[in-house]
């Protein structure tokens, strides 16, 4: 019998805990046919509602349900890492509690594992139900990432992924504090089958990802898997030095040949403000990389467990 670990990060998902369990159990016949046992590992990321209480109720009804509860909110990346670290399965699958990752895809995903793939990943081909502006910036992020990074990140990729134990171990070997799982999946490699499906809206509740949170998450990804912003800062510095040198030559020539006095304080002020803005922008890029290095050097734990139920 193979053991499948179903890892479900949760943050204020009390309405969806039982619904997810019920949907997963609809695959019982498939699990029996393929001789697969499963464990359902809910990772509570410091929820403020009754998520933990709902998981405990399920555990009382089914011992296959497990719980890891954090001491506070550490973020979804920490919850994913904790789930992979604590899971016991020969296979592991990451899924969202809001049922945007349909459990009904598991039989098809497992079929590709049987064909020899190391992991089966999913991507959305539509963004139905998502705000237009958010969809636009999401697509722009994937385009930019794939141009400036050697790590391929597929447009519309979800965290919903079925993995063999060797892939899980490879991901766990990357114990960095500043985590960007989509990039880590691409970096570790292995033979991956991509499964496409249309976007599924949340069953209940509201998304915890605001536009600002997604923007900051994208910055995390760019800094974690590309040094191109540092190159851009360097190139901009060189270009402005060349431009300044040319302007000095032009000013001297105008004065010597035409006696044209240097004038125009408004344009000078605008130029100073523009150059200062570029300098601050470049310092901000450096600051982002330094801040991430600072957090890595501290070697703080990625998460702290408040309660664990096996």
Image (cartoon, rainbow, N blue to C red):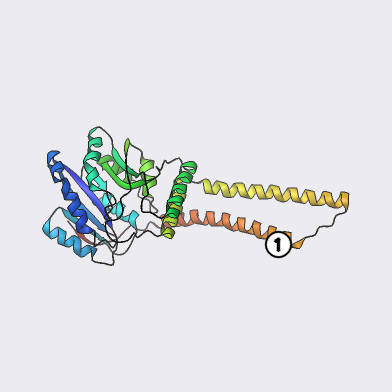
Indicate the quadrant where residue 77 lies: bottom left
110 or 284: nearer the viewer: 110
Give the residue at the far top of this rendering.
115
How far across and how far down the image is residue 19, in percent? 20, 56
How far across and how far down the image is residue 49, in percent? 26, 67
Residue sitting at x 25%, y 35%: 112
- 149 vs 122, left or right, is right
- 266 vs 171, left or right, is right
Residue hosting label 1: 269
Answer whether residue 244 is visible to the viewer in this image: yes
- 252 vs 101, left or right, is right
The relative height of residue 259 versus residue 173 in the rendered view (above or below) is: below
Residue sitting at x 67%, y 50%: 240
Q: Report the number of discs.
A: 1
Q: Quadrant of the C terminus?
A: bottom left
The 10 Å Cα crowd at callout 1, few under 14, some 14 to 19, many 20 or more, is few
How far across and how far down the image is residue 68, in percent? 23, 58
Answer whether residue 87 is visible to the viewer in this image: no
**At numbered mark 1, what does the secondary structure look like: helix, strand or loop?**
helix
The relative height of residue 224 versus residue 206 in the rendered view (above or below) is: above
Q: Quadrant of the N terminus?
A: top left
How far across and how far down the image is residue 278, in percent? 61, 55
Indicate the quadrant where residue 117 lies: top left
């Amino acid at each position: 019998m193979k053991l499948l670990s179903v890892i479900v990060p949760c943050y204020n998902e009390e309405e969806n805990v039982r619904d997810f369990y019920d949907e997963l159990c609809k695959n019982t016949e498939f699990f029996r046919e393929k001789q697969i046992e499963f464990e359902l590992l809910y990772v509570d990321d410091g929820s403020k509602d009754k998520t933990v209480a709902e998981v405990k109720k399920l555990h009382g009804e089914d011992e296959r349900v497990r719980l890891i509860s954090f001491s506070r909110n550490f973020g979804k990346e920490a919850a994913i890492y904790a789930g992979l670290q604590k899971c016991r399965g020969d296979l592991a699958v990451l899924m969202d509690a809001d049922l945007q990752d349909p459990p009904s895809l598991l039989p098809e995903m497992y079929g590709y594992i049987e064909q020899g793939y190391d992991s089966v990943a999913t991507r959305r081909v539509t963004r139905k139900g998502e705000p237009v502006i958010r969809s636009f910036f999401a697509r722009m992020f994937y385009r930019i990432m794939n141009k400036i990074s050697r790590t391929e990140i597929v447009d519309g990729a979800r965290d919903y992924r079925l993995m063999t134990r060797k892939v899980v171990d490879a991901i766990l070997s990357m114990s960095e504090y500043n985590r960007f799982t989509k990039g880590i999946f691409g970096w570790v490699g292995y033979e991956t089958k991509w499964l496409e499906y249309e976007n599924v809206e949340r069953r209940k509740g509201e998304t915890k990802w605001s536009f600002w949170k997604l923007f900051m998450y994208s910055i995390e990804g760019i800094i974690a898997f590309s040094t191109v912003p540092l190159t851009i800062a360097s190139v901009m510095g060189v270009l402005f030095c060349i431009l300044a040198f040319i302007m000095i030559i032009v000013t001297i020539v105008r004065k010597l040949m035409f006696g044209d006095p240097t004038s125009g304080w408004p344009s000078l002020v605008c130029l100073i403000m523009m150059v200062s803005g570029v300098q601050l922008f470049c310092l901000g890029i450096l600051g982002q990389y330094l801040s991430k290095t600072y957090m890595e050097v501290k070697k703080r734990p990625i998460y702290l467990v408040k309660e664990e139920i096996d």
